Image (spheres, coloured by chain):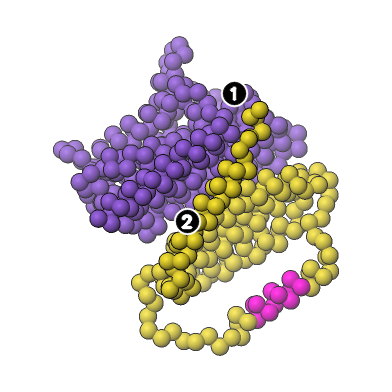
Amino acid sequence: MTVTTLPVWSVVPLAAVVVCWAYAAATVDAALDPAPGRARLARPLVETSRLLRQPRRVTPAPDLLLWRIGIAGPFVAALLMAIVVPFGGHVVSGMAVGIVWFNAMDVVLWAFWWLAGWGPNSVYALVGGYRFLAQALAYELPLMFALTAPAVAASSLDMRDVVMAQGELWFAVEMPVAFVVFLISVVGFSSWGPLGHPAGVDVADGVLAEPSGLDRLLLLVGRYALLAVGSAMAAALFLGGAAGPWLPGWVWSIVKTLAVLVMLVGVRRRVPIVRADRLMALAWVVVLPLTLLQVLVVAVVELR
Amino acid sequence: MSLLLFAVVGLVAVASGIAVFVVDSMARATFALALSFVAVGVEILLLDLAYLGVITILMMVMEMAIMAVFMVMYMMNPAGLMPMSMMHNKRGALIISSAAFVVLAAGSLLVPWPSRSGSAPPDLTRAVGDAIMGSKMLVMIAVSAVLFATMVSAIVLATARGRYDS
């Protein structure tokens, strides 16, 4: 399974594709909502039109510059991540260090989520921003080692090589721990579901408490886009990318990404929120040693 | 073209570095510094050192996000609600930093740079690593594992009881 690099102008259609995937994620979220309600599948459209018409609510003495950066941040980070994610046998940037780039962009989210919490000068939002940093400290190191495992197995940081190295066996089978840790981390940097502590209902939705109108729309699109791009990355890193029998590559990419996305979105209302300090203990005492062992196993298999 | 880009990014790095001392909010100062570091990371990317450039951006943004917490926690004027100056010993600091900048800038312009012999190696990051570390590479790799284990165990010892555990 080879991956071809697209010309530079393809970043424009890429942005449109990411927005479509964010819309798909929102639709899946609405469809999986166990609460009764009519016309669920139209809910993202209704919500978008509502937010577009809603006037912007302002808080006293906000730091508008930093707030705007924090609001646009998650969507920008999702777009920057997307340029190194192979999809359907194509990738926009054939960067030699694609995995590190993806990692750097998810670290940039530390700053963006904190700024989204700091900007409005509101106590609940601020608590949410600080919670994100506490949570990020917990999931980031396991995520780094989970990204290291496929890179070691492929002997390359280039996403094209990682996809090609899965000719015989998907990395999800070869390194299940890394796969699961990666999925949890995607949920973590999207501040979603069990790792949605920064936007928890106990602090009036935390970082999501104050944004309204267009700001809120942008932040929510960014969050769904992060989930979608993370799913596409999981499909490329661990599920063989566009490889598969009978059907063309792009269909397989869509099927795999959608399967991961449905799982990540669906976890939201089925698993309780893990408090950041409890997550920290779990992540560093249990998960971090497991991921280190996973990298060791992969490295030994690779050496052999 | 790439020279122009290099100059623009360099100016961004210097300008946001100056902004650190101009703004009166700890959050803005921290993220102005982060922007300065990201610009330096982009400069490294422009030198065809992809891995080093991206890892610089990664490390610096992470550090600055954590530093924002401590800056806001320790500074007397966390949110910029009261005027405060980031500068201490203003005149001395200004003289020392200007002199350091002039010396370094003049040095980079006046030093007779050697002309390149041969061609650039295919993997520049590897060449830089070899030049800096050379035969000490294995030692450094072993030490890094020890350092990491030390950090983890120090944190585990320090936080045996979290603030929420009784």
Does residue B123 sit above or below B26 in this rendering?
below
Residue A98: % across, % down: 39, 54
Residue at the (63%, 82%) spot, across then down: B107
Chain A tint in image: purple
Q: Residue placed farthest to the left in the image? A: A246
Secondary element at tag 2: helix
| Left or right, A164 with reference to A205 | left
At mark 1, the secondary structure is: helix
Instruction: Indicate whether B126 appears above or below B103.
Output: above
> Where is residue A260 shown, x and y percent of the image?
35, 33
Q: What is the chain identity of the residue bearing mark 1?
A: A
Name the amino acid, label 2.
Ala
The yellow-coloured chain is labelled: B
Q: Which secondary structure type mostly characterizes the magenta part of the structure?
A: helix
Residue A15 appears in the picture as rendered: no
Is A129 in front, or is A39? A129
User: What residue is disc 2 on?
Assistant: B145
In the figure, is residue B104 to the left or right of A14? right
Res B76 seen here = yes
The amino acid type, in three-letter code, at marker 1 is Val
Q: Residue at x 49, y 87 (%)?
A: B114
Task: Provide the residue span drawn in magenta.
Answer: B96-106
Give the residue at mark 1.
A201
